Image (spheres, helix red, strand yellow):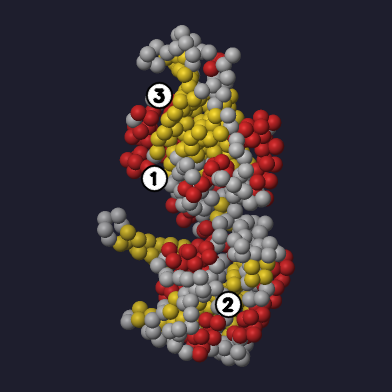
Amino acid sequence: MPYTAEISRTNPGCFVFLVDQSASMSDPMGTGEVTQQRAKVVSDAINRLLTELSVKCAKEEGVRDYFHVAVIGYGHNHVGSAFQGALAGRDLVPLSEVANNPARVESRTKKVPDGAGGLVETSVQFPVWMDPVINGGTPMTRAFGYADSLVANWVEAHPSSFPPIVLNLTDGESTDGDPTSAAIALASHATADGAVLLFNLHVSGSDGTPVTFPDSEEGLPDTYARLLFQMSSVLPSHMRSYAASQGHRVSETTRGFVYNADITSIVEFLDIGTRATELR
Amino acid sequence: MEDVSALPECQLLQVPKAGNALKECEDAGLFWFGDARSDDHGRTVLPLYAAVSDGASESLLAGAWAERLVADTVESMSFGRDWWEDVDAFVVDLIGRSGPRWQAYLDWYQAKRDANGRPITWYEQPGLEKGAFATVLGAEIRATVPDNGRTNWSWHAFALGDSCLFHLRNGVVRRAFPFEHVEDFGITPRLLGSRNHDTALVAERLQLAHGALAPGDEVLLASDALAAWLLSPHHGHKTPGTLLATLAEVGDEPFTEWVEDQRGRGLMRNDDVTLIRIKVRTEA
């Protein structure tokens, strides 16, 4: 049965995050007075996810290399690593190195229950690996091509691992041609456990309602949304079950796709799309 | 007053997950022969205490917490005499031992990390704050020796989570506790957290069981992967206990090889395996 490989240090998993850095990512998202730049929301969500992965894989001797991770930015004149600091320029990096090399650790405030029914502000450490970058167009086809070469090498080195998961976060249409062929090529790489999973998230450009994990094109508003849907892989069973447990309606054809994502659905997309089978 | 022939045979076997070293095993197992004493009826009582704990892999220091729990479980059972008769007092005693000892261990661990130039990092801090989690299964095998007459054998056990006890006769499972079916094994078993000091809640969640034993009977305490194997109808052995006994009696290595073989054939989950095997001696 595909997508059931155990994730261990000898058979690690692989995540490639593709982050749109086009000019429109500087537009705000959110409602009312609480708005944030899209690029900032996405980079915060990825930094938070890398933090959670590191915490989840931390053992007494350090963070275990259950995953290899790449964060690739794509904008007008650059497709490549979005890591900053010591990892700048690196593509797929074992998780222990990710955990030990954030560009910086910020101190942020968070509200937590005070034990008496109220909330109190406390300071938490927030590691940062990537900052928001804004840079011209949306070369999605090149980004898929870049991811293609990363996963091609990776599956060759890890033929029995859970296949790589590529998570593409974008707010606009590709500016370097129809990315469909590149997406098909990318998702055609496979390990013995199944083909590469490509999940797509479209960040909201309006106050529209998010469409989360649809199982058909019905209800998608335009050609672009349908294109992203068609390029998105069907969720494997353990992610489907997890999505259902988080209150999503799922079927056997549910895809790893979110359209018109708001801040909450960006976090959900990353949480569900990186949900691992058991770690060993 | 002690009759050594009444003591059961006991053995502890452990195999870490494939890909892990034995020191990375997050299960713990312990058995201890208690002192002979007289019960309220003046009969000699010979107790054997055993405990298995399975540390939750996604918590930090889970193996150390499991070690703490088996040691304190054995101690609490031995101090509690008929501990199963007042489970609330038993839990208060157990958590009263584990809580302060665990805090002392954490203080020592953090000081050691500082001294080694490896202070606790941002990615460990949330795990330490959340605490460590583990299942716990404790059992007392008791021989009661009247002045004139045959020794009576019994077992009393408590369980929190999916580590299981099996009572075997002639290699066949007569009783499984707390789970009776392989379908009972979920991915989120009940666990005892190192920060859980709610003794009433823990007492409410503890399950108790007991039974009588005959000479030659075996009691197995097993962590979940092996327990699920024992309850699985697919293992193809009508007398799984005989198979385990044959392997265990030869020693650690054949048992390890057998576990690896079962994992390789998809008949056992790749998880830490702990087995305590207790055999009631056949009287001459």
- Name the residue at 38% across, 30% down: B84
Task: Name the front one of labels 3 and 1.
Answer: 3
Q: Residue A99 location, x and y as percent?
A: 57, 62
In the image, farthest residue toward the left:
A117
Q: Nearer the viewer, residue A278 or A87?
A: A278
Gap between marks 1 and 2 measured at Cα: 41 Å
Q: In the image, residue A164 lies at what x, y percent?
A: 62, 69
Give the mark nearest the N terminus, 3 or 1.
3
Instruction: Please report, as a chain letter, where disc 3 is located.
Output: B
**To which residue does mark 2 refer?**
A18
Do the residues indicated by labels 2 and 3 lie within the same chain of the protein? no
Query: Disc 2 on helix, strand or loop?
Result: strand
Identify the disc placed on residue B196: 1
Q: Is residue B145 above or below residue B142?
A: above
Q: What type is the residue that disc 2 sits on?
A: Leu
Residue at label 3?
B81
Position of residue A205 relative to residue A65, above or below, is: below
How many marks overall? Answer: 3
